[in-house]
Image (spheres, rainbow, N blue to C red):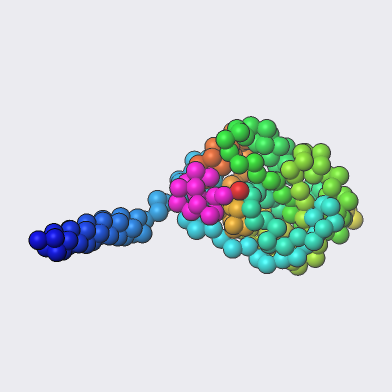
Amino acid sequence: MDRSIRLTLIILLLVVVLIFGLVVGRQVLLVGNEEPSPAPELSEINAYVYDQGRELADFELVNEQGKTVTRESLRGQWTFAFVGYTNCPDICPVAMANLRRTDSLLPDDLPQPEFLLITADPEHDTPERLREYVGFFGDNFHGYTGDLETLREVAKSLNAAFTHREVDGDLLVDHSGHFALINPEGKMAAVLQPPHNPEDLVKAYREIYEWARANHPRASQS
């Protein structure tokens, strides 16, 4: 009789374990098959979000502190990146002022991003000049300079471009005016086209961050 009871208990235990395994397996399968939600539609505020982050060109440049930076330097935080130059007479001062205003409007519940000026004029934008320029806008504003062709490739991978021309002996640089939002994996998550409104930039950043946190957790951490 005792042997029969033990056998029955063992069978019941195996059945419970089997059912539990099936339930857990089904939940894992369902979660694994869930399609991530599409990227937020933000075209009404001139923001265009990629379903998957875009790889940036590999690079070795120098920041405003004179330290070597690479693509890996962009990992670990969100970054608003902009291609411009410190002697720019119009687009860049407005763009940088909009980024500073955006920075001041960011609520505490969002990760603090960095703001990056990638120069299109490395001949004049030395690390010292960049440090003086970006330092005016805030401690989390930075600049990259270096080899001209490397800078072109980085700009290209951010959907940006620039060309040099001389006017009355002065160098002028024609360049793109958008911001690129780089996620903590060091990939381009979105393009933010002008005209730039700081309130809209904060809104776009929030929606992109919250979407990334829900659908691409590694790409949202900072």
Residue at left offset 59%, top offset 47%: 192
Residue at the far front: name it. 2
Residue 104 quadrant: top right
Instruction: Considering the whole magenta stretch, tell me its main secondary structure.
Output: helix
Quarter of image, res 66: bottom right
* Res 165 seen here: no
**On screen, 67 above or below 134?**
below
Is residue 36 something one can see in this rendering?
Answer: yes
> Where is residue 155 shown, x and y percent of the image?
68, 60
Q: Nearer the viewer, residue 45 or 216?
A: 216
Which residue appears at 88% of the width and 51% of the height? Answer: 128
Q: Nearer the viewer, residue 32 or 197?
A: 32
Q: Quadrant of the N terminus?
A: bottom left
Residue at 26% x, 56% y is 20
Which residue does the image show at 40% across and 54% down from the upper left? 36
The image shows residue 219 at horizontal and vertical percentages of 54, 54
Q: Left or right? Give the position of 30 relative to 218.
A: left
Closer-to-camera residue (24/110): 24
Is residue 15 rendered magenta in the image?
no
What segment is highlighted magenta in the picture?
Answer: 209-221
**Left or right, 50 with reference to 195:** left
As for residue 211 lying within the magenta part, the answer is yes
Locate residue 48, reporting x and y percent. Answer: 52, 49
